[in-house]
Each structure stands twice: as C-alpha cells, then as structure tokens.
Amino acid sequence: MDTCYVDFHSHLVPGIDDGAVDGDDSLEMARILAGYGFSTVHCTPHLIRGGFENRPDGVRSGVEALQAQLTDAGIPVHLVAGTEHYFDEYLMDLVPGALTVGGSRYLLVEIPFRAPGDLVPAMAIQLRRLGMLPLFAHPERCAAFDPPRHEAGLLGTLSSVLGRRKDPSLEGSLVLDLKRSGCKFQGNIGSFAGVYGSVVRQRAIVLLKNGIYSCLGSDAHTSQGLSDILASGLDTVVASIGESAARRLLTGELVYD
C-alpha cells in the first residue's frame, strides 16, 4: 500500500468543532488514516462566524499539541494546520491572515449545501483579487454544483432501460466553468462510500469521472466507522478511474500543479 497519501480535509483536532471529541478519538482517527496509507493530514476545523470561530493561532496550537501526541504514540502522520472556511457574508472579513492549504494560494471553502449557484462565482472573483483561489470542499454535497440532468421523457427512459445512458456531460455547468477559471475541488471519500446517500454518491462519481477533483479528503469527524468508510470509498474511486488516476488524487499532486 502507498504511504504517501494526503488527506486534505479532516477534523482531527479535539474539542474545537464538531470533530474529534477527545485526544483518544484523535489518535485513533490518525491510526486508521495511517493504516490506509495517509502520511499527511490537513487538520481543517470549521471557521464559522458565530459558531466555530477557530482563528489561525488557535488552530496552530491545537495542531502542534496533537502532533506531539502522535509522535509520542508512534503514529507516522504529519499534520498540517488549515481551516474549513464557511461561505457566508463574513468570509472576506476572515480572509486576511487565513490558513491556506499548505501555505499555497488556495483556501478551503465550504459552500452551504443549498446555496444558490449564482453567488459562487462572485466569491471566487473576490478571492482572486486578494491573491487567493478557492479549493471547494465536497462539491458533490452542494446543490450549486449539481451536474446537468439526464435527458427526460421517453428517450431518457428508453436509454436507461436499454443501458445506453451515458454519464452526463458537464459542459456549461458551474463546476466546470469554475475549474477552468483556476478553482479546485476536494471530494469526500465518504461520499463515494454512500455516507451521504445515493444521490450524493452518484454526483461524486460523475464529478470524479469528469476530472473535476484535484484532491480527496476523509472529512473525518470521528474514528467510529472510519475504517469501513475509507475502504468502501477508496474502492469506488479506484473502480471508477483506475489505480493510476486515483493515486494522483490521493497524493495531492494535482493541487499544486
């Protein structure tokens, strides 16, 4: 098994958001991730005004403390301090001094699941003016990034019955337009495992096969069930695009290309 995978989205730092509840949970999550070949894990707690207000200094301190615990426990995982920024009217106020993805110009951004798509390009433009670009977290879970629908009516029904329905093209879609403009996308491994339901799973596979993702993340919030989720999700990714393409996503090389 490869030992150089990168998890770009996780909630390992205990007690600062809705992720790990304590240090033991954090250590077990790290052990499981290491067992599946992840040697680098980006710790990305939520930053939500009025909710989880995890500022950079606090995140760094939490990551440093957890890294020391991992080292003492002999768990071979390198932690990177980051943040999952919530897309709302306060986002731009929080950008100065923000923890970007591995010190790059990319900012991990979570779009509200039912946010209207027409607001997203404007946000991307604002970030670009500040010298940053969004790395969108789990787009498969967001209605704004829903791929075009299959053809409707009798033709669509016949295509489905006869097994001739092709994966939908993303031409003209918001997600493809954003990718072509330089934005990047992180898929949740749990989405491919069906954690969020069949609709999200199918949407994730469509985005995957169309080359939308630049990286993957566990989005792990707890150690419970994590091993099964990783096993199922990674199997689906490999079955969908092959081992070579899956490895490129898992090593993170497409984020910094």
Image (cartoon, grey):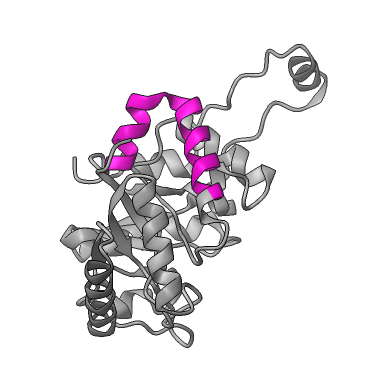
From the top left corner, tell me how far across and down residue 66 is, in percent.
29, 75
Magenta: predominant secondary structure element?
helix
Q: Residue at x 56, y 59 (%)?
A: 116
Q: Residue at x 47, y 88 (%)?
A: 50
Q: Is residue 59 left or right of residue 196?
A: left
From the top left corner, tell me how far across and down residue 130 is, in percent.
20, 66
The residue lying toward the viewer, choosing from 28 and 140, is 28
From the top left corner, tell me how far across and down residue 56 is, in percent.
25, 79
Residue 163 in view here: yes
Q: Is residue 139 left or right of residue 201?
A: left
Where residue 155 sits, quadrant-wise, is top right
The residue lying toward the viewer, choosing from 29 and 83, is 29
Residue span colored magenta: 228-251
The residue lying toward the viewer, choosing from 112 and 73, is 73
**Residue 65 sits inside the magenta stretch:** no
Q: Residue at x 65, y 34 (%)?
A: 149
Q: Is residue 111 left or right of residue 250?
A: right
Quadrant of image for the N terminus: top left
Q: Residue furthest right?
A: 154
Residue 85 in view here: no
Quadrant of image for the C terminus: top left
